[in-house]
Amino acid sequence: MIRRFAALLSVALAGMAVFLLRDTGGPARLPAASAAPVAAPAGTPSGADEHYARMMVTHHEQAVRMSRTLLAKGDVPERIRLIAEFIEHDQQREIDQTDAWLAAWDRPPAGSAAPTTGPDAAAHGMLTAAQLAELDRADPAAAPTIFLRLMIEHHRGAITMSRAVLDLPDGNAYIRGMARHVINEQTAENDAMTAMLGTVPAT
């Protein structure tokens, strides 16, 4: 029990660290991310806690993939490149922390129960194979606009899912902290990306 509590506390505290996107000037400054509040780990996670954790890992994995796809194309406008790099690193960090949280509670890994297609996936903002393929095949000139449009939609799904888990009467402290962090950070990112859409040169 002591070992499990220590592992969970370590994960919860690690979740407070947030990368800051360096300001390079221009009209669309991304605000510094808000750290999730420190809270002692709660008791045994509920089914809703586990579902959120697995679905969010899968959701984050898609965002990391999209960011890497865009960055691999090269010649990305600096502001968009910075936010793609931020998303890639920050969401990979959250994936690793949530995987550690699941392991600490002896729960199945994320990939075993989180759907990536179908109605449940769509309801949580997962992009379709066709949408991902649109970004994959886009030329470097068109890719930044496509990336911003798709990532904004993707973030909206994560925000909706996070609000739903916070609407529950109680839950595991790490999951509730993560949900608040997702809402705060991805809302700020969406504000920044929406502003960036108006600055991308027409192709």
Image: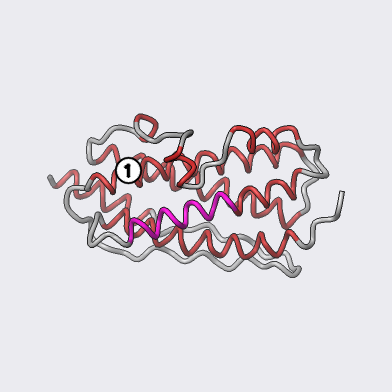
157 relative to 141 in the view: left or right: left
Which segment is the magenta one? 153-166
Residue under the point 48% across and 64% down: 184
Residue under the point 78% across and 52% down: 77
Q: Is residue 81 above or below residue 196?
A: above
Q: Is residue 121 above or below residue 199?
A: above
Residue indicated by mark 1: 51
> Where's residue 102, x and y in %?
30, 40
Residue under the point 26% across and 49% down: 8
Residue under the point 19% across and 49% down: 5
Secondary-structure class at tag 1: helix
Q: Is residue 167 above or below residue 175?
A: below
Main secondary structure found in the magenta portion:
helix
> Where's residue 99, x and y in %?
36, 39
Q: Quarter-wise, where is residue 12 in the image?
A: bottom left
User: Is the N terminus in the top left, top right, bottom left or bottom right quadrant?
Assistant: top left
Check if residue 134 falls in the magenta segment: no
Q: How many marks?
A: 1
125 relative to 178 in the view: left or right: right
Q: How is the image coloured?
A: secondary structure
Looking at this view, name the residue that lies furthest to the left: 1
Check if residue 161 falls in the magenta segment: yes
> Where's residue 11, x and y in %?
32, 50
Looking at this view, name the residue that lies furthest to the top: 112
Looking at this view, name the residue that lies furthest to the right: 203
Looking at this view, name the residue that lies furthest to the front: 119
> Where's residue 167, x and y in %?
31, 62
24 relative to 20 in the view: left or right: right
> Looking at the picture, which amino acid does disc 1 mark?
His
Q: Quarter-wise, where is residue 181 in the image?
A: bottom left
| Mark 1: few/some/many CA within 10 Å (<14, 14-19, 20+) | some
